Amino acid sequence: MTDTASKPGQTEVWITGIGLATSLGEGLDANWAALSEKRINVDEKGFAPFIVHPLLPVSFDSQIPKKGDQRQMEAWQRIGVYAAGLALDSAGIKGNKDILSKIDMVVAAGGGERDLNVDTGVLTAEAKGANAPGFLNERLMSDLRPTLFLAQLSNLLAGNIAIVNGLGGTSRTFMGEEVAGADAARIALSRIASGESDIALVGGSHNGERKDLMVLYEFGDFNLRDKFAPVWARKDHAGFALGSAGAFLVLESKAHAEARGAKPYAKLSSVVTDLARRKQSGDMEATLEKLWDKLPKRDGKGAIISGATGAEPATSEERGFLTKHADFPVRATGTMFGHTMETQFPLGIALAALSISRGALFPPNDSTGTEVEMQGAPTQIVVVGAGHWRGEGMALVEAV
Amino acid sequence: MTAPRDKLGRPVVVVTGMGITTSLGAGKADNWSKLVAGESGIRTITRFPIDGLKTTMAGTVDFVSVDPFSSTGLSERMAELVTQEALEQAGIGAKGDFPGPLFLAVAPVEVEWPQRRELGRAVGAPDFNYDDLLRISGGGKYNAYHHRFMFGSVAAYLAETFGTKGSPISLSTACASGATSIQLGVEAIRRGETDAALCVATDGTVNPEALVRFSLLSALSTQNDPPQAASRPFSKNRDGFVMAEGAGALVLESYEAATARGAKILGVIAGCGELTDSFHRTRSSPDGKPIIGCMNKTLADAGMTPDQIDHINAHGTATPENDKMEYNTTSAVFGDLLQKIPVTSNKSMVGHTISAAGAVEAIFSLLTLEHQRIPPTINYDNPDPTILFDVVGNKARDARVTAVMSNSFGFGGQNASLILTREPA
């Protein structure tokens, strides 16, 4: 197990910026309003029989002013650059060259957004008999847009954020589905807590409106079909509905934040991650229990924000874990935002910090009774992220 | 005895195990003997048809078999082989029980053409669209492809096979990925989170689409004949890099932990540095400031000055822009000292192993320190008159080498440098 907890002598790490662009809207107010009103944005028709949570359209110009920059990106990157810009705005450091020239970046990314017309063009031509040895080569040479590669490379989300915002610190891109988002937060936190870094931009983005991704997840029968239901109500109708979202956080040492007069939404006290073998039933639940025990002491008013996907058996195992901690009211982001893969964990941290800063946990949105009302202001929220196939992460977000 | 710390009071990080596979062969011994003999691993591609391609050669690793073949599968198998070699040398932990985390540099993963074609054939009709592909993807028939094409699949396999601790990190910083994997390991040990880390970098992505993608960006050499002469770092007639496959693994430990268990120390990771260039997606800032800053940060991290570096293992891709920019920036950092610093590019022989390059070249740098012999930059017959490096051209050179700087620069403004030394400073 690897963990990052603030140790004696280590600096406190604050969340001083949050940027959200999701299927519920852009910015903190719009997302908070939608959560409070239990609004969910799902498209059951566009990708039928599959279901997605589409991005609520945003004006990319406001965060990516150059059209040339926008053209160099595919949707997943535009969403991420947009959300990263919102996070820098929220932290009050947009355009602050002194800070941006040294800010460290840890980004969780997938990639590979494909040109579906090129793919089907090749496959149907082959189905009609095209079988010359160089057929694929020639079609790819003539049909692929040269710049598409850059829109596919995982590290080009970070690259585009740096270009658009003029960032000049370190830049690391973690891959590996859901837990990549947790590890990105873990490494950024540990670097700041140990004094290796003062300030970091952490997050991810995902375009769920992609048939090439649906093919990949359909291989494992992971896509939710036909009818939307809250993640806890999918046991006999398992699967996840992909969601589009960008979620970025500005993490900062307390001293650095105070020196520039920045106010925290919350503090990020700990992030722990692990890789359960998931060979036997109960492996994952046991790993979640271990991670829970590694978090710092919880003696405040607590809640849990879960990234449960709705896929099985992971969701049932996670529910087994949650049942043992029933004194913590639970919220599943997958119900409201869909499954945003690498972005789900940063999104969970963002919503935890937002809930703490607004003095309330957003209301339950669930038909099974797994989610219950919470009275009063949460002071400690545990973010849980268990991947649909591999990888487990947990974070503790606390009131400052 | 107090634990050795570096000048900044952090644990000294040493290397106790290394494993390598490139187009030259498997293992350190084979690679090193061929490298100093000036052999090239670049050959005409036989894995798939080359008709219609502008570039028809690469540094493929054809002696490692994977069935069914996929680039991700090859990356995984090479990573496994080099990790075994590194662990055998390090003699650390127990079988299947490595006492630290895994940091894996790996190429981005996606469904590949053989699998996509299988799906296309399975539709069983001459006309279809993407929805038809999607419709037949489920039902469990292709379950193995889900696992194969998860980004985290290679790391998960390695973590389970070698028993690394915690969540393995899969990372990409493009052509700097290998260096970044080492940097993450160094940082984890310096922070005191672990006494050991396994840093692996692998790339098996010589496939038609990857080749076409780089080709369309005009990044690849097209001097196909003879393939061995295609990669020409620092030459006037260089025309691009040569794609290649390979993997490298390093066992990192704190000096204290390594000496406590009596491990043989192969070298020291004295410094790491990284600096993002926000100028352009594929080109470096014309003033070179980010690269200069990266090298300076690395020197500062090592607590060293330019006069203490006596060899540079260059990024040296042989693209017209990289080599020129690398010379300009390196000379800005080292000034007149540069005349006395021999420089070489391993890519002249093994090609550009992309995600693996930073680790592969760190291992070659450590072998250079061990053997006190610098491998040549082959195909150096027509030096670029504007690149005034002391290039170790064509023949290996014996030299006193105490500290090597190894540089990696990648698309997306990724710059990373390492400083490797024989003994703790």
Image (cartoon, helix red, strand yellow):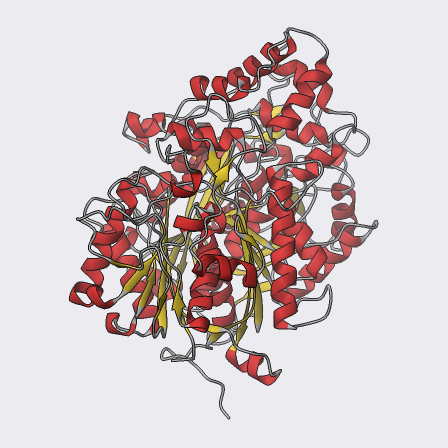
Q: Is residue B278 at least partly visible in the picture?
A: no
- Location of residue B143 (image quadrant): top right
Q: Is residue B185 at least partly visible in the picture?
A: yes
x then y, percent, for residue B260:
59, 84
- Front-most of residues B163 and A186: B163
x then y, percent, for residue B384:
22, 47
Q: Is residue A119 left or right of residue A324?
A: left
For image coordinates 67% across by 48% down, the residue present is A329
For image coordinates 52% across by 76% down, the residue present is B254
Instruction: Reply above or below: B369 against B286.
Output: below
- Location of residue B307 (image quadrant): bottom left
For image coordinates 48% across by 18% down, the residue present is A138
x then y, percent, for residue B330:
24, 58
Instruction: Reply above or below: B164 against B304.
Output: above
For image coordinates 34% across by 38% down, the residue present is B240
Q: Is residue A321 left or right of residue B291?
A: right
